[in-house]
Structure formats: C-alpha cells, structure tokens
Amino acid sequence: MTILTNITIKIWRQEGPDTEGRFETHQIPEISDEASFLELLDILNERLIEEGKEAIVFDHDCREGICGTCSMMIDGQAHGPQKGTATCQLHMRTFSSGDEIVVEPWRATAFPIIKDLMVDRAPFDRIMEVGGFITAPTGGAPDANIIPIPKPVIDASMDAASCIGCGACVAACPNGAANLFTAAKITHLNLLPQGQAERYKRAEAMVEKMDEYFGSCTNHGECEAACPKEISIDTIATMNVDYWKSKFKNRQHLDR
Amino acid sequence: MSMNLDANIPEGPLADKWQNFIANERLVNPSNKRKFKIIVVGTGLAGASAAATFGELGYEVEAFTFHDSPRRAHSISAQGGINAAKNYPGDGDSVHRLFFDTVKGGDFRAREANVHRLAEVSNEIIDQMVAQGVPFAREYGGLLDNRSFGGAQVSRTFYARGQTGQQLLIGAYQQLSRQIGLGNVKLWNRMEMVDIVNIDGRCAGIVCRDLLTGEFSSHSAHAVVLATGGYGNVFYLSTNAMSCNVTAAWRAHRRGAAFANPSYTQIHPTCIPQADDFQSKLTLMSESLRNDGRIWVPVSADETRTADQIPEDERDYYLERIYPSFGNLAPRDVSSRAAKRMVDAGQGVGPLKNGVYLDFADAIERLGRSTIEERYGNLFDMYERITGENPYETPMRIYPASHYTMGGLWVDYELMTTVPGLYAAGEANFSDHGANRLGASALMQGLSDGYFVLPYTISMYLSKLLNKPIPDASHEEFTKVENEARDRFANYLAIDGTQGPDYFHRKLGKIIWDYCGMDRDADGLRKALSDISSLHEEFKKDLKVTGSDKNVNQTLEKAGRVDDFFELGMLMCKDALNREESCGGHFRVEYQTDDGEAVRNDEDFAYVSAWEWTGDPLEPNEHKEQLEYEVVKFQTRSYK
Ligand SMILES: Cc1cc2nc3c(=O)[nH]c(=O)nc-3n(C[C@H](O)[C@H](O)[C@H](O)COP(=O)(O)OP(=O)(O)OC[C@H]3O[C@@H](n4cnc5c(N)ncnc54)[C@H](O)[C@@H]3O)c2cc1C
Ligand code: FES
C-alpha cells in the first residue's frame, strides 16, 4: 500500500436543475492508493458532514462496474482516465501525489442535472419502452434448446448486451448523441433468432424515440473510447442498416 | 398475541401439490382484472418479473423503486448463474434432485412444499428467459452450456459469461419496459417506500418519500408485493450494492408482518479481502471460479515467501483434504468457515494475512490460458482492477464476506406475509433456502416468485375483494402513517449531533460481524445485544444529517436505513441466541463436533422462527412454524 499525498479535488456543486453551478475545491492531504475513487469522495463527504456542510450528491450503487449508476466526468473524461473502467472501479493508484482532479457531472442536454453530480437519464428508459424487448409474455415459451444459436452469434449478442446503460457514450459525444447505447440494445436483440420477428419495427421505433431526445451522430467515435464495457461502434452500423431497411423497404410491416 | 402461521400448503403428494393448487385456485376473470390495483415495491428480478406479468394479465399495476431505473437493481450484479433441472448434460439431474439438493443445502430448515415448487418451475424460467432474448452461454453446436456450482454434483447452472444477473435483469426489465410502454404498468422511480398502511386487518397501501423532492405521498391498492431484496448490508461491509437495505421489510414487520429466521445469513467464501479501514464494500469473485481454481494456504503460519516460491508439499489444499468428495466445491457455509479457521490459525495470505489463495495455475496448465480467459476473463479483469494484481500470474486472494440473507419476511405457500394482502417475493422473503442457500438459486427463486408463483397465488386473495370498495389514499389512516413518516425524517435532521450515518453503520456492522457473523456463541450474542442497543441510543442523540429535506439528500436517506438496521441487528442476535444448534449459515460454537462440524438439533429446532414486533426491539415475541418433512429424511449434511 502506498499513500498518495496532497490531492486537490475540484468538484461541481449545483443545488438543483434550475440553479447555477460552480466548482468547489477540497484538499485531501492523504489517501491510500488502494482506495477507490468513490471511497475518496466518501471520505470527503464524511468530513463535510462533520463540518456541518452538505455532502456532495453523486449516483452510485453496485461499485462493481455493472449497474451503470455511477456517472462522472473525471478530468474531462467520462469515467476518468482508465480504459474500459467505470468510475466505481477506478482506484487511486491511477493517480499521483499532488494531482488536481476535476470532477463534473455528465454534460448533455438530454441528461439534465438533478443536483451536484447526479443527472436524469430517464430518456434511456423511454427508448427501451418503445421496442427494447422481445414480445414473449410469461408462460408458453418453447423449450430453451429448441433453437440452437451458433456460438459466434450468441457471443456477438452478448458483447452488445453487456451495455450497462451508464450514459458515458452520451456524455463523451460532442453532439450528445445516444447512438452507441441504442445500437447496443438493438444489436443485442436483432442478432438473435428470437429477435427476428420484431427486428425492423424495433430498430425504427427505438431510433425515432432516440432522435426525440438526443443529438445526432457524426461519427466522432468518442463514445466507443469512453464506454466502460468497450462496446464496439460497429453496433451503430448494424442499427443503421436495420433502420434504413425498415424505412425504405417498409420492412416494419413484416413485423406487424 | 397469537399469530397465524398456517402455511396453506395444498393437499396431495409433494410432487402434485403445485399442480393441485393451480387446478383448484380461485381465478379472477379477465374483464375483472383491471378492477384490481397491485402495488409492487422493488424492480429487481422478483419485482420486475412480477410487475410485468401482472401487467400482461390485465391488472392495474404500479411499480416503485428507489433507483433511477429498474435496470439498476442489485440483481444486476449476480455473476455466476441460475440453476434449473433441465438435465441437458444428461448427468442425472431431475426436479427431484434439484429439490433434494436445495433442502439438503438449506440444512433441513426450509419448507419442503415451497422448495419442490421452485424446482418444478425452474425449467420454465430458462425457457422464458431464452424466449425473451437472454444470451446464455452456448456450446459450439449452438445448444445451451451448463456449469457446476457448490453443493451439487451435477452441472445445472446456466450462465451468461460472469454477468448472469445482469442479463436476467435486463430480460425482466425489458418485459417490464414493454408493459410500461403499453400503459399497463406505471413506474415510480426514485421513490422510497417508507411505511405500509393497514386498514381493517388488511394491507391497504404504502407511504413513499420522493427522493428528488423529499415529499411524502400515500398510495392505496388491493394488494402490495414487497420485492425489496435482502439485508446483507446490515454488516456494513458486504458484497451487496451500497443502497441495499431492510427498510421496506422492516417497516412491514413493525406493522405486523412476522420476520422469519433473521439470523440465517450467508457468508460467501470467495470475496476480495478488505484492504483498509475506509473500504466501502467488498467485491465478490464468483463461486464458479471454484470449478477451476484450487484453494490453499501455506502449511506454516510463519510463511513469508510469495505463492510461486512455496513448494507443493508446503501447501495445504484444505478443502480437498477435509472434504474429498466435494473438494473445492464444498457449499458456501462450509467453505467460509474453513477459510476463517485457516486465517485465525495464522495461515492467512496477503499483506494483512487476511485471505486464502484461489489458484488457477493448474487449470491454466491443463486447459490453456485462453479457455480460462473465456470462462472467467471479466472476473479476472475486475480482480486486477481492484487489487492491482494479475490472477493469471499470481493466485487470487479471497476471504468470506456477507453476501445473502436467507431470513426475511415470513410468507405462506402463496407468498403472503402474516398481513393479509401483503406479499413478499425474492430475497425479501424467507421461503426457499432454509439455513443456507446454494449458489445460483437466488436468481431462480426471484424469477420463480415473480413470473410463476405470484401471478397464480395472488388471485386467491384478490378474488375475495371483487366489487368490494377499498379505502383510497385519503383515508385517515394513510394521513396518520404519512405524518409519522414525515416526523421521523424531520427528526433525523433535528438531532444535529456530531456523526454522520456511515459512522454508526460502520460500528454497527462490526458488532454484528464479530458476534453474529461466521460463528456465534451465547455470551457474544448477549454482548452484541447490549452493544447494539447502546449504539442505537447514541445514534438517536448524536446523529448528524446536513442539508435539507426538500431536495435530494443522500445523507438523510442513509439515516433512515441505518436506523432500521439497528433494530434488525438486535432481532438477528435474539434469533441466533434462541437457536441453540448449528445449522447452515448459523454456526453456534457451543454446538459442534470434535472436528469442528456443525451439530444440528432436529428434535428441538426443526422449525421456522417467526418474530412478532412488540414495540421494544429487545423484547420481540417468537412464534414457531414446525417443519414437517414428508419426503426428505433428516440426515447429517456431509460433504466429506
Ligand atoms: C455480488 C453478488 C453476486 C450474486 N450472484 C448470484 C448468482 O450467481 N446466482 C444467484 O442465484 N444469486 C446470486 N446472488 C444473489 C441474487 O443476486 C439476489 O439474491 C437477487 O438478485 C435478489 O433479487 P431481488 O429481486 O429479490 O432483489 P433486488 O435485485 O435487490 O431488488 C430490490 C429492489 O427493491 C427496490 N427497493 C428496495 N427497498 C425499497 C424501498 N424501501 N422503496 C422502494 N424500492 C425499494 C430496489 O430499488 C430494487 O429495485 C448474488 C448476489 C450478490 C451480492
Ligand atoms: S456503481 Fe455500479 S457501475 Fe459504478
């Protein structure tokens, strides 16, 4: 265990959605390199409470990189400097003594700030509600082994399904687009034999719902670099193909 | 007061009970379903699957979660897999065997009829989840793959890399999203249920606090389902997500729902050991790793060499040595205690000597690195991110941690608590795992409760309410309970002491871990009861919550949850003290054999303890549901 010293945290504070925010600066004299970045914020918060000040609000839950709740820009990067790593899995050993670390919320028009570092990501749920599913009501499903699915297909579907819905892709995108998220969701289901019946309808509905909230994709590729699950930008191509097929060839009617 | 603990088990031979129930149940006809409103609190596997299915059936459904989205529930972090009796590998599995393994794994403290039903519906769960698009792992031929898990000698576990819970929850969340999109389910997110309301002897609804505005509101319904997860965070450090808590179940308990077997908690053997004092949670390394990893410690307590420098004959592969037939796959409680003994004996490894090795060197040599990477790659990466060590090269270090709670709200066969109209599902109830849960069975139980049990059983109750008016949220009882909740939260802010809720939680967790953790004894439990009680008094005088109750205040949320953990902690110790035997996760040092194995006492303790709240957390009333075994015969649980 090594102790890091003299860390400066410049962190965004904002009372509510309609108030102005500002940076606040805090000194952390000592911290173990074994601590996670969120544990550093825990320690800071306990100190603030003892001093009678309000704790910094931030979203987090599993602290295992799987629930997608944590969401911070750290030194201008979504989830911070370590590739393929969500904020909660970032450890202080990534930083050095004397560092100044700048912490901000996701910045995107579709994700309004609720308070401090907490934002509202509800538009993701809205996209899911219009097509991010296979219609398979409970009961009456056929035996699970009735349709063999080749391993490469299930693997590709699983790669896309690994999306944790954190919103880093949107936060990293200069246009605030949600194409990587939406494409991951569509690709997960559209690759599967079970997903074929609603394939085109799904793509069309989800893309159009996405467009109601988010900016448009101009192929920057920042989303892929920021994704803690390293979801491939190729999924966007899959999504676009299905969307345009649906649009131009009226494929969505096949699903109805 | 007397309490009705009739489990309502259907007639007939064990294997026919569930079908008999379905054949004879009272139904609600489709056009009447929309006259009934069901509230589901919690949108994890159990809650999301229940809410989605109720919606499909035509009920009016409102689902509540304190998360921003159903997809965040703690179910998402389950790694290893889900059991089912499919017998796809043809290795001798059957519904009966899954049932038997679960009863035995639970150390003969679970209700036979419930467990049998769970085993029966297990296969439908896999069918259902595949139909919904869950990308379970497959063989090259395209058929589903299985792995084995602790406490079983067959391969019956379905998995999706090390992210099974994530994929299952996304499946259930997709079904729920569809129902929300169709307008059949209304979702209330970032809403915390803080109390239930009973009127005229039935549950009439709930009171919630909006986590964004701090506002309290009342919601009435014909029936309420709590699917609010387990209470493993009572230990402060656990593998649970940070927000897991007991409040919903506890508040229901305070309003008359019996709390069953609170002392049955599961300590998972394979977690990353604590690194320092301000650690906020412990990370699980899936039990599936024990399929290929070998567990060992150095023979000598004075060992200073690194793992690779220690020769074979100076290593103790203690699980393989003590439990030759199950070896590294011995069940969780057995493996956890064995690890603790090794560490207590000074043979622990790592900088703080607080772990044991889980070594993949043999497996990598036998199967090749790429196979191991394929099976466990994401777990290995996670381990490296947390510890800075590479498990392909040095063995992992692991140690037991609080992981799952078998205890929970008492429910009958229909999953109804002792409060009519109030149901509990998933980890929040006590129903299927007895004194110890087998790996990959919690996901199965959550989905079984939500998809395949509640949708059938709830109509038994609802059909009786047809065309009878129910009180709405303007009823004076709702106002009263809402005011009590408002005062409670205002009071946390008003105390204005010196320490935040985490300070108290950490201290509480340590008491419970030390005295009501992996092993327990009467003196320790008595001490814990008095320590918890005095710490709770200190909490009430010295708590400090900053900020306001008019917008997001995570310190205030935490204060309410810690307050409830105190009272639960006392009940756990009470329960552990009364149960003068060792069974499953409950190990009383006074009751063990000469070589340290648990001694169960079926004569006196083959019952479920169901506790009644009396108003004084130190003086609860114990009621007993005697367990009758028709099919399984008591036997000493041996994995040797
Ligand atoms: C790290 C880890 C790995 C695991 N791996 C496995 C595995 O491989 N196989 C297996 O079978 N099991 C595993 N388990 C256990 C299993 O994941 C859980 O038991 C199961 O997912 C619980 O599901 P649930 O639906 O009951 O509750 P949860 O998923 O915990 O959901 C609880 C829900 O209730 C809501 N809630 C709670 N209280 C309130 C309130 N007061 N007001 C409003 N909403 C509330 C939450 O928002 C959430 O939506 C694992 C557990 C852990 C900790
Ligand atoms: S807290 Fe769950 S992904 Fe970071």
Image: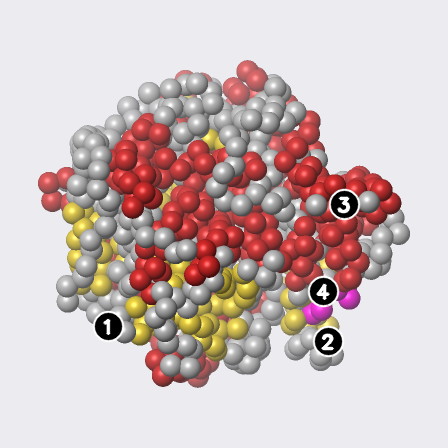
Query: How packed is label 3: few (under 14 Cα within 10 Å), some, or many (20 or more)?
Result: many
The answer to whether residue A210 is seen in the rendering is yes
- Looking at the image, which residue is at 67% across and 66% down? A119
Q: Is residue B308 or residue B114 the one in the foreground?
A: B114
Q: Mark 4 and mark 3: span between their CA atoms?
A: 30 Å
Q: Which chain carries label 3?
A: A
Pick the front one: B58 or B521: B58
**Callouts 1 and 3 close, C-beta under 8 Å:** no
Rendered image quadrant of residue B469: bottom left
Q: Nearer the viewer, residue B55 or A192?
A: B55
Q: Does the magenta stretch include residue B585?
A: no
Q: Distance between the residues labelled 1 and 3?
A: 61 Å
**Residue tagged by mark 3?**
A252
Report whether A220 appears left or right of B382.
right
Q: What element carries label 2?
A: loop
- How far is the residue under mark 4 from the one under mark 2? 15 Å
Q: Quadrant of residue B124?
A: top left
What residue is drawn where x is 28% and y is 48%? B413
**First in sequence: mark 2 vs mark 3:** 2
Q: Which amino acid does label 1 sit on?
A: Gly
| Label 1 lies in ligand 1 vicinity (Cβ under 8 Å) | no
> Does residue B621 appear to the left or right of A244 in the view shown?
left
Q: Residue A21 carries which label?
A: 2
Q: Is A249 left or right of B606, judged from the image as shown? A: right
Which segment did they paint magenta? A107-113
Both marks 4 and 3 on one chain: yes
Q: Which amino acid does label 2 sit on?
A: Gly
